Image (cartoon, rainbow, N blue to C red):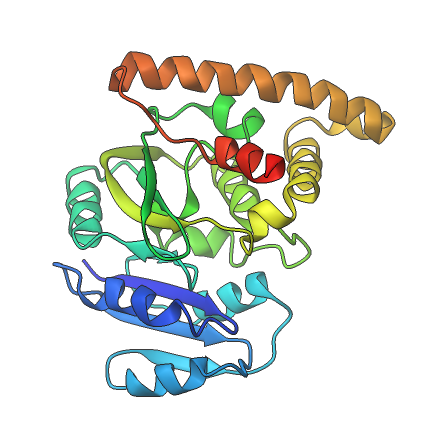
Amino acid sequence: MNVGIVVPCFNAVETIENTLLSLLEQTYCIHEIWVIDGASTDGTIEILKRYSDKINWVSEKDRGQTDAINKGFSRLSSDIIKWVNADDLLVETAVQDVVDFFSNNIDKDFVYGDIEFIDREGAQLGLHREPSFSPFIMIYGHNLFADPTCFWRRTWMISIPELAVEVQYSMDYWFWLKLLKKGGKFGQIKKVLAKYRVDDHNVSIANHQKMRHEHFDICIDLFIPFLSFFPKFASYRFLNIILVTARIYKKIKIKWERGSGKSFSFGNYIKKDSNS
């Protein structure tokens, strides 16, 4: 079973090499790696050149991260695919675990796992365990799982050939909901599959409120279009109440299924960052 990975990249000289090494040092060899660079000017290109015998890459101006991911997907031919941001990492057994999962679960189209959060220097901030799949949490709790842990069958790119370029911060959430709406079957691996780097430069933190509103707009468009007839402040307030409910349910579900161990929350980091 072949695995292909896209790495969207722009001015990532501080992190791109570690990201590439986390892919190249997998216990299960990745069939194809495509780095789609947005014409970096900080030394990233020199790093990509050093790995030209092990990866495929292109550097040209694009319309942002989503456009870069789409360009990469159009080049993949593997059975299982994903994208990895240029500052995130896969744990060394992640691809093997995913291949084993899909080999043993032919009815599943998509799989996710647990995530380890790290800081800019790579030090561990904490682990986050995920609950079993819940459409309610995914739709209304805004992402049941962290996108670096997600893999899916490439056959889904036939029905959803590319991500929505107009979505600035939530292309992952948009894609997961499209998969769900089209009948995709989701599974879970109860192991850490990836490391997610969080700091002040992270788009999800720097633009958290805009991302939240974009999530609401996607949710309305795909699942509850009648809310579009109400003023945005009213529909957002209504959805925020459901969001809080979904996240409380998620915490209860994690405790029930995964035990009482401490679980680091990305939301807690955002609150901590905003208070500092």
Image quarter of the N terminus? bottom left
* Residue depicted at 56% across the width and 63% down the height: 65
Q: Is residue 141 left or right of residue 233?
A: left
Q: In this rendered view, identify the residue nearer to me: 274 or 247.
A: 274
* Residue depicted at 30% across the width and 86% down the height: 50
* Residue depicted at 75% across the width and 21% down the height: 237
Does residue 223 lie above or below 69 as drawn? above
The answer to whether any part of residue 73 appears in the image is: yes
Quadrant of the image occupied by residue 24: bottom left
The answer to whether any part of residue 109 appears in the image is: no
Does residue 224 lie above or below 167 as drawn? above
* Residue depicted at 47% across the width and 36% down the height: 266
Q: Position of residue 170 (x, y in %)?
A: 59, 46
Quadrant of the image occupied by residue 117: top left
Does residue 94 lie above or below 129 as drawn? below
Q: Specify the farthest residue to the front.
A: 276
Q: Total of numbered circles in the picture? A: 0
Q: Position of residue 91 (x, y in %)?
A: 23, 52
Q: In this rendered view, identify the residue nearer to me: 97 or 123.
A: 123
Q: Position of residue 273 (x, y in %)?
A: 56, 40
Image quarter of the C terminus? top right
Q: Position of residue 137 (x, y in %)?
A: 49, 23
Quadrant of the image occupied by residue 255: top left
Does residue 206 lie above or below 75 as drawn? above
